Image (cartoon, rainbow, N blue to C red):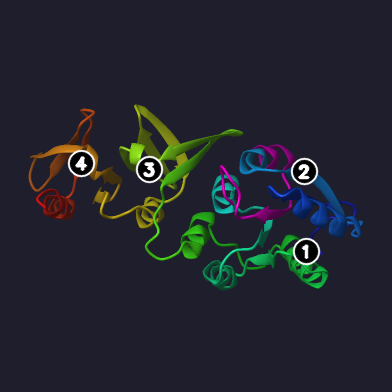
Amino acid sequence: MTQDAHRKIRAMIVDDEELARQVLREFLSAHADIELVAECANGFEAVKAAAERKPDLIFLDIQMPKLDGFEVLELIGMDAAIIFVTAFDNHAIRAFEVHAVDYLLKPIAVYRFEAALARARERIENKSSPAAPKASELAAAARPPAQYLDRIPVRDGTSVFIIPVAKLDYAEAQDDYVALASQGKKHLKQQTISSLEAALDPSRFLRVHRSYIVNLERVVKVEPYGKDSYVAVLNTGVQLPVSRAGYSRLRSLLDR
């Protein structure tokens, strides 16, 4: 067993319903090897607490105001074992099952809690168990078909910023991050540009280059730039490189 026998599992509860938190708290109190290090009533508290308390296990509600569970997960990453607590629909449940993520349906039954906790212990203790999926991939799998992002949460330390998609000018790939340009500022988010592209409405956002996605409403004109290359000029004056394939897609959309 790789978990230190003298070290308790550090658990955190995130749910906007006091009753749900109380139920989980009581269930956990029966387990001497678990230490409850934080209780959070919303996603903003959860992001801050996760950064400060470094939990091994998180009981995470999905349907919360301000930040939902998927957005919280994207911001804190998936180093901790995650048990979703939800009254969510069947589409989401299928996504959890496909990605081997533990979940509890409200109202929570004791036997299901114990089973989920056992799986979480196994994941925490067995470092050779299969890697958890990326948070962005899980969120995309659980999102209903044809439902695209309308906002993007970004973490800066323990602070969280919400970027409305309508105010996103463009996104730029930077290794495993994307730089999100909005209202004259850039915010870094740990996400691949391909997963971001899949989450954005293709009628409003276009991948014009392997490293750039642009908000079509911001494009003023497209100009030649060397042989077989172009630049998209935005209404902010920013110029973005456009590949040959990107140019064809861009022209077809702008000429509609």
Residue type at numbered disc 2: Ala
Residue position marked by numbered label 3 in the rendering: 165
Earlier residue among tags 1 and 3: 1
Q: Which mark is residue 241?
A: 4
**Residues in magenta, as a range:** 48-68
The answer to whether residue 209 is seen in the rendering is no
Question: Residue flagged by tag 4: what amino acid is it?
Answer: Pro
Residue type indicated by callout 3: Val
Mark whose residue sits in front, 4 or 2: 2
The amino acid sitting under disc 1 is: Arg
The residue wearing badge 2 is 38
Q: Cα distance, mark 1 to mark 3? A: 38 Å
What residue is drawn where x is 39% and y is 55%?
148
Mark 1 and 3 residues: CB-CB less than 8 Å, in contact? no
Q: x, y (%) of residue 156?
A: 54, 33
- The span from disc 4 to disc 2 (Cα, nearest Å) is 46 Å
Specify which label sits upstream in the sequence, 4 or 2.
2
Q: Position of residue 232 (x, y in %)?
A: 17, 39
Tell me which residue sits at (57%, 50%) in the image: 68
Residue linked to disc 1: 121
Which badge, 2 or 1, comes first in the chain's sequence?
2
Disc 1 crowd, CA 10 A, few/some/many (<14, 14-19, 20+)? some
Secondary structure found at label 2: strand
| Residue 122 falls in image quadrant | bottom right
